[in-house]
Amino acid sequence: MNEKDYFSYELLHEDAQTGARAGILTTPHGKIETPIFMPVGTNSSVKSLTSDQIKDTGAQIILSNSYHLYLRAGTKRIRKFGGIHGWMNWDKPVLTDSGGFQVFSLAHLRKITEDGVEFRDPKDGTKHFISPEVSMEIQQDIGADIIMAFDECAPYPCDYDTAKAAMERTHRWLERCFKAKTNPKQALFPIVQGAFYEDLRKESARVISTFDAVGYAIGGLSVGEPKDIMNKFVEFTAPLLPNNKPRYLMGVGTPEDLLDGIIRGIDMFDCVLPTRNARHGSFFTPDGKANIKNEKFKDDASPLVEGCDCYACRNHSRAYIRHLWKCQEATAATLLSIHNIQYLLNFAKQCRQAILEDRFGDFYNENYPRLIK
């Protein structure tokens, strides 16, 4: 048995106006309709929400972070509980990142070698080592449906030689990842690197495409670069990847980001922003972000967004949620998180429907100016 016995991707339609894509990714824990946004549960929990609350938003897949789970609670413990699905009582697909981005962000606490990365836990100072083989062991213990290759993410900005060295190491590590992965019920996604150099991005896409993977990811973006530069490199990179496989843009997730990515051929997105913004009082609307702390919501009886079918909007007013926030009640962040996640999921569904009806260009033009004004 191999991955192809448990996973498949069907590209259903490409929008006649823009080429944006709609498909279905089949995994051992269910089907995922793309384009899709994946809520992030860093520590095997989407912050402030129960598993049932996440399901109620309509989430088809969530992301969890192998670096954090490796450090706490420990992936061997999670494996004893039946993997991530049993551990957090979640019966739908899960994706884990490799921990590479988190490790490489610890610039003053880590040392990169060809073997892997030695680093210290920023919380207690203990020393750890992750290699491609260890990353695969960690992610196989966690038991996610989709796992990511251990890669080196070059910083922004960086010089050409630094970007090239990180890309080439990523390719060598990718080969080691595929050799170390043994569970056919997990799909390993390679990651394009190459920083902000077109020839490196082209070379990286060529190399990772030689691995017949279930899907491919675009990494090394959303690392501090201006939005126009990110869009430029998404637009350049996406067509270099196999057309019949899902394309995952890592670490991106606002309504305008979804529009920008989908119109450039992206199928999968994830980001911590929906819940992080909620914890700061911010919520998504068709006209961009709003903040519940605003005085104008003090006596506002309307929902966060008219017509939104999330639990918060069906049951509570802006005035009530603002009251909770002002009283420092944790329920405020929970309600805003539910709204933000479901709003993004519904927005992705609207994008998908527009693609299937060959009107995504019109949908983009109707919505994008309102979101960025």
Image: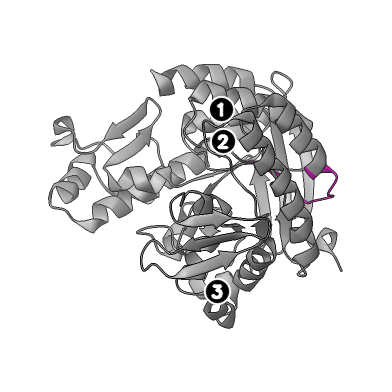
User: Which residue lies at the image location 40% right of the left edge and 64% below the top edge?
Assistant: 50
Query: Contact (CB < 8 A) between labels 2 and 1?
Result: yes
Count up the numbered dots.
3
Q: Amino acid at mark 2?
A: Leu
Label 1 neighbour load within 10 Å: few <14, some 14-19, many 20+: some
Quadrant of the image occupied by residue 158: top right
Q: Is residue 279 visible?
A: yes
What residue did someone put label 3 on? Answer: 75
Circle nearer the N terminus (2, 3): 3
Q: Secondary structure at mark 2?
A: loop
Horizontally, residue 132 falls left or right of residue 241, namely left
Q: Position of residue 327 (x, y in %)?
A: 12, 52
What residue did someone put label 2 on? Answer: 221
Circle nearer the N terminus (3, 1): 3
Q: Nearer the viewer, residue 134 or 44?
A: 134
Q: Residues in magenta?
A: 208-218
User: Which residue lies at the image location 76% right of the left edge and 69% below the top edge?
Assistant: 183
Q: Secondary structure at mark 1?
A: helix
User: Vertical placement of 305 versus 124: above or below?
Assistant: above
User: Which residue lies at the image location 67% right of the left edge and 29% below the top edge?
Assistant: 355
Circle nearer the N terminus (2, 1): 2
Q: Nearer the viewer, residue 162 or 364?
A: 162
Cα–Cα span, label 2 and label 1 = 6 Å
User: Vertical placement of 264 versus 208: above or below?
Assistant: above
Q: Nearer the viewer, residue 127 or 318?
A: 127
